[in-house]
């Protein structure tokens, strides 16, 4: 994996906060290490681009409890849509030195944003077009692309900079189906004699998930009980789009079966499951853009309560990897 340049530019430190300019979007973040533009070498030669925002922990103990968050955008969008969420995840929080830390990575999925080149086995580069993505291309996002991202996070974990055992995912529109299907890869990875190589995903926020997005279905993730039960789920969509809402309701019902109501009171809060239907027909990244303040705050709160504030064992990952289709 090679760390390289991108169109990210860095500005000066102002009032002890880092000002980051990313493709014209200015965000105020907590003082700490600067973001890292990264290149991911996917197994099939796709050149993926992303930006990594370190957690900013000041002690080894804090670093090993830092929660990594992967952000996955919608169709024909790019990673810049998550800049406001990144700012909230990395903003100063109450609680002083003991408050949770988040390390964030935003990714341009294949054929999107800056991830539009693929090197063929012959070494010849070809251009990728989102409009020409097949079902196989979407499936590759959920396995090959995401396993490349995981490899980067494994490096950070093994360096003691975060805890991959606290992994959280945010997916919007197309990215929601990618997130759920990769979580299935993670939760079905067989254990190794030297330790586990999966079950790292602990929480997922899905914005406007569809039961099937161009053939990338939620069916298999919703069939696998351990994934549904052991992961905390946040579901968000615009409630005035009846087609999306029908898919949303179907996913919600699947998850309600394994996330009981706290205290067994009808209509009450469910353990590890939260739902937010917004009064709009907007979906995916459009919904995220219009309702960023409400959605982003809910995501940060959900991840904090269900993952970041909880202690999880930290360990180096096994050196033998047999996950997915690598």
Image (spheres, helix red, strand yellow):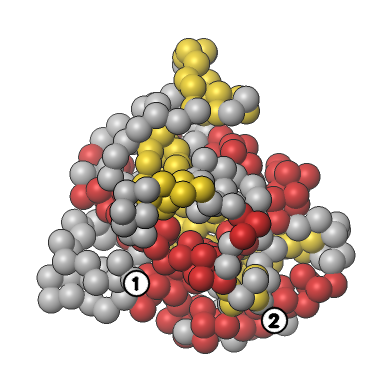
Check the image and report above or below for 295 versus 25: below
As drawn, the label of residue 282 is none
Q: Secondary structure at mark 1?
A: loop
Classify 10 Å Cα crowding around label 2: few (below 14), some (14-19), many (20 and above). some
Q: Specify the label residue 324 is tagged with.
A: 1
Residue at image point 32% right, 36% down: 3
Marks 1/2: CA–CA distance: 27 Å
Q: Quadrant location of residue 49?
A: top left
Front one among 1 and 72: 1
From the top left corner, tell me how far across and down residue 82 is, in percent.
Answer: 59, 42
Q: Looking at the picture, how far across and down is residue 201, in whole percent?
A: 41, 64
Q: Say which of 181 and 266 sits in front.
A: 181
State which quarter of the image contains the C terminus.
bottom left
- On the rendered structure, is 49 left or right of 258? left
Front residue of this view, candidates 107 and 261: 107
Relative to residue 100, is residue 308 depicted above or below?
Answer: below
Residue 131, compared with residue 92, is above or below; it is below
Quadrant housing residue 38: top left
The residue drawn where x is 76% and y is 58% is 283
Res 109 seen here: no
Residue 250 circle label: 2
Please tell me which of labels 1 and 2 falls first in the chain.
2
């Amino acid at each position: 994996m090679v760390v390289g340049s991108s169109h990210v530019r860095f500005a000066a430190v102002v009032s002890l906060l880092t000002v980051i300019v990313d493709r014209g979007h200015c965000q105020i973040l907590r003082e700490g290490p600067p973001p890292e533009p990264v290149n991911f070498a996917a197994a099939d030669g796709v050149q993926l681009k992303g930006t990594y925002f370190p957690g900013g922990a000041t002690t080894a103990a804090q670093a090993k409890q830092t929660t990594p968050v992967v952000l996955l955008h919608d169709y024909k969008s790019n990673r810049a849509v998550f800049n406001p969420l990144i700012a909230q995840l990395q903003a100063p929080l109450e609680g002083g030195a003991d408050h949770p830390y988040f390390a964030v990575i935003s990714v341009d999925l294949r054929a999107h944003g800056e991830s539009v080149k693929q090197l063929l086995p012959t070494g010849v580069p070809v251009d990728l077009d989102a409009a020409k993505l097949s079902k196989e291309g979407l499936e590759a996002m959920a396995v090959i692309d995401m396993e490349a991202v995981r490899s980067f996070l494994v490096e950070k974990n093994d360096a003691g900079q975060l805890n991959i055992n606290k992994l959280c995912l945010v997916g919007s529109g197309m990215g929601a189906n990618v997130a759920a299907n990769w979580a299935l890869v993670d939760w079905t990875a067989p254990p190794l004699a030297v330790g586990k190589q999966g079950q790292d995903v602990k929480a997922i926020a899905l914005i406007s998930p569809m039961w099937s997005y161009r053939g990338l279905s939620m069916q298999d993730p919703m069939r696998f009980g351990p994934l549904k039960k052991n992961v905390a789920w946040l579901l968000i969509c615009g409630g005035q789009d009846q087609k999306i809402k029908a898919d949303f309701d179907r996913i919600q019902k699947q998850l309600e079966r394994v996330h009981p109501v706290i205290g067994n009171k009808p209509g009450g809060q469910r353990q590890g499951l939260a739902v937010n239907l917004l009064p709009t027909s907007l979906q995916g990244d459009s919904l995220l853009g219009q309702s960023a303040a409400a959605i982003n705050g809910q995501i940060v709160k959900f991840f904090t309560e269900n993952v970041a504030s909880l202690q999880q064992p930290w360990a180096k990952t096994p050196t033998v990897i047999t996950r997915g289709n690598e």
